Image (cartoon, rainbow, N blue to C red):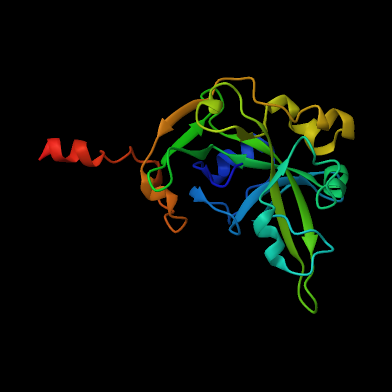
Amino acid sequence: MCSRYFLDADGNIIAYTFRVPQNPRVQRRYNIAPTQEAPVVRVDAGGARELAILRWGLVPSWAKDIGVGNKMINARGESVAEKPAFREALRKRRCLVPATGFFEWEGPPGRKQPFAITVPEAPVFAFAGLWESWRPAGGEPVQTFTIVTTDANDAVAAIHDRMPVILAPGDADTWLAGDLERARALLKPFAGEVKLRPVTRRMSDPRAEGPECLDDPEPTWGAQQRLL
């Protein structure tokens, strides 16, 4: 599962990396949480790439309530082609979710230690994503997205059994516009190097949004006592 990620990069870097026009709404983000808006890259009706700001948590077009999206922040790669909520989006509405890293936690409840997970060779990369448009009764359309997940690779498996599908730069076009079978073949654990670094527990609060979310972890209570 991926329930938090970050995008610590300027808009011009994101535009250059993903070959899209700059969007003034794109800002550095240090703790992106479900139901918040975040940038995705997709193909527009004319076949060109565009950067759009969508709500995290996919809401199928047939859903009765936007709250459905709270349970659909991730789509399991192993079953995404069969799930009614995702299978049409997999065929027609794939997207890239720009990121500079994601968070996972390890440890017992109440004492979980968050880790920031990054790709050293790719300061900015993309998760495989899907997007959808939903219209409430009598309201304006709401566009939403989900992040596709897979089994953890060896490094991430030390703290969690799942991870987002991280796309290699050369696979971005295939995911966005390639045929379905070639796109599905990309839904596998990341084969490159990832780095895990413990960070402050303050980032576990979704209201925390500043660069301090990537600070080093606080000393444990015992360590604090030794420092006194």
Tell which residue pokes out farthest to the front in this image: 108
Residue 31 visible to an observer of this rendering: yes
Camera-side residue: 44 or 202? Answer: 202
Q: Looking at the picture, how far across and down is residue 180, in whole percent?
A: 88, 35
Tell which residue pokes out farthest to the left in this image: 228
Label tally: 0
Q: Toward which corner of the image does residue 157 lie, by quadrant?
A: top right
Residue 28 visible to an observer of this rendering: no
Q: Looking at the picture, how far across and down is residue 219, in whole percent?
A: 25, 38
Q: Toward which corner of the image does residue 215 lie, by quadrant?
A: top left
Q: Looking at the picture, how far across and down is residue 67, in whole percent?
A: 68, 65
Quarter the C terminus occupies: top left
Q: Looking at the picture, how far across and down is residue 37, in whole percent?
A: 61, 57
Determine the residue positioned at 81% across, 44% down.
48
Establish if 105 lies above or below 189: below
Q: Toward which corner of the image does residue 77 lie, by quadrant?
A: top right
Q: Residue 135 vs residue 66: left or right?
A: right
Determine the residue positioned at 43% across, 50% down.
204
